[in-house]
Amino acid sequence: MSAGADRYEAFDERDRNEDGDGDGDEKREEVVGGVTGGGAAPDQPNDPGEPGRPGDRRGPEGPGGPQGPDRPEGSHDDVPGRPPRIPLPRSSVEDSGLPLPTPVPTPAPLPLVLEHRVLKSLLGAWALAACSAQETAAVEEHLGDCGSCADEALRLREAVGLLHPAESLDLDPALRTRVLEGCLGRRPPRIPVPDWATPYDAEAARLDALLQDIGDAEWHAPVRLRWFEGNGPTSRRTTVAGVIAHLLSVDGLVAVALGLEDPLASPSAEATPTARTEAYWSTSHFPPTRSVRGPWREQSHNLVRTVSFAGGGSGRLPVQYGAFELPLSDSMLDRAFECWVHAGDIADAVDYPYEPPAPRHLHGMIDLAARMLPGSLAERRRAGLSAAPSRHLVEAGAPGRSLRLEIEGSGGGEWLIPLDSPGAIASAEREVAHVALDGVEFCRLAAGHVSPEEAAAGQDGDREAIRDVLFAAASLSRM
């Protein structure tokens, strides 16, 4: 027999063993008839293939094989007691009607018992919230009993807070003050800045930081300077660079009092802030540009440096403002106030956020305005702009009617304002009115940015006295 017949004999033997009968003989003869009768060999083109090869119709997976779709009855899947080749889907416990199994409770984890040195080494991971639940519980229980570890954990948690990204790119306005206080607390300066000059130093630095952030085109952004004259508001249009030129010109009054160089090439005969500003603007061949920042910055540094070398006693040096004068200590507060107000004007023009001064600096500015109110009241009375009757006027040094000015919020306090004379003594027994204002709102009123009628004030008592004080506060403003 040929080799192909041997292979079919092997296949026929396997069929006989599986079926247990001799039916495979007939099938074998039908299949191999072409071979034994001289037909084509299995490796010829018309051969359907060898059994067991892929695609063989006579193989185990072919149509006539034991696993094919035409398998005979009694094949592998139909044998009783034998599991099916493809398992059936399992039924759910809920569908069977049987009771559900009782869940086994999970035992609670035992608390960790760690040594002090191990707990101390976990403080860093605890501050970063990187401990497991058991370690966190053990560390927090230990912190209630160990003071040294509690202090260390507090320092680590504060340090972790510094690692978080800031929510805003704008720095805290009090950051510079805190940093300087921390530095000066560790090593005091050999030549300290007087307390009455620190508000100007801080506000000039904040404005300089604002100017550093703006672009070249923004230096020509329009700005409207606003103040109050008589019984109504007034304004003047300029640019960001024009505002810095205005500050440079008026700060020159302080520079002249200290013997420094005057920024005006030809000072005006009138030493008023408005006249000096107009003179600077008119003598410039071109509108001011960002180049004005350098002279203003250098002048502000020279002012702070000079008053620091001169010592605290120089605060009594008079500074002329034309119609009035101020001691140097009050003049530096006045310049700090103007620096903050005009920095806010610039920030509004370039759409930049700007915060109020530090509370203690703001308190000094409010105190200066409150001390200047009696003089402003008297000036308005001489100009016929006051509603107060003349019968209430008293001599200097005598007690007179008073108004209680209550400033709320950051930098606030209470002041008694004499109403009848700048030299009168304010007396709580003769208080006739009470006004309450927010600190920033009062400063906006004193800067001429809010009209007296629009000021959100809590009022009680003599309405005429309240009106006079609010108008007097607005009259403190100037360009």
Image (cartoon, helix red, strand yellow):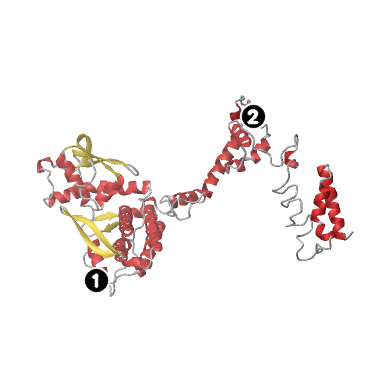
> Is 445 placed left or right of 61 in the picture?
left
Query: Which residue is the site of mark 1?
Result: 282
Give the residue displayed 85% in from the left and 49% down from the top: 13
Secondary element under disc 1, as helix, strand or loop, is: helix
Q: Amino acid at mark 1?
A: Ser
* Label whose residue precedes the other's in the sequence (1 or 2): 2
Q: How dense is the environment of label 2, judged by Cα within 10 Å: few (below 14), some, or many (20 and up)?
A: few
Can residue 428 be seen here? yes
Label pair 1/2, CB-CB below 8 angstroms: no
Task: Look at the image and tell me in which quarter the C terminus lies.
Answer: bottom left
Q: Residue at x 86, y 57 (%)?
A: 5
Residue 394 appears in the figure? no
Q: Which residue is mark 2?
A: 106
Q: Nearer the viewer, residue 235 or 302?
A: 235
Which residue is more in the foreground, 153 or 368?
Answer: 153
Residue 10: x %, y % from top left: 85, 52
**Tag nearer the camera, 1 or 2:** 2
On the image, the x and y values in percent for residue 56 come to 75, 56
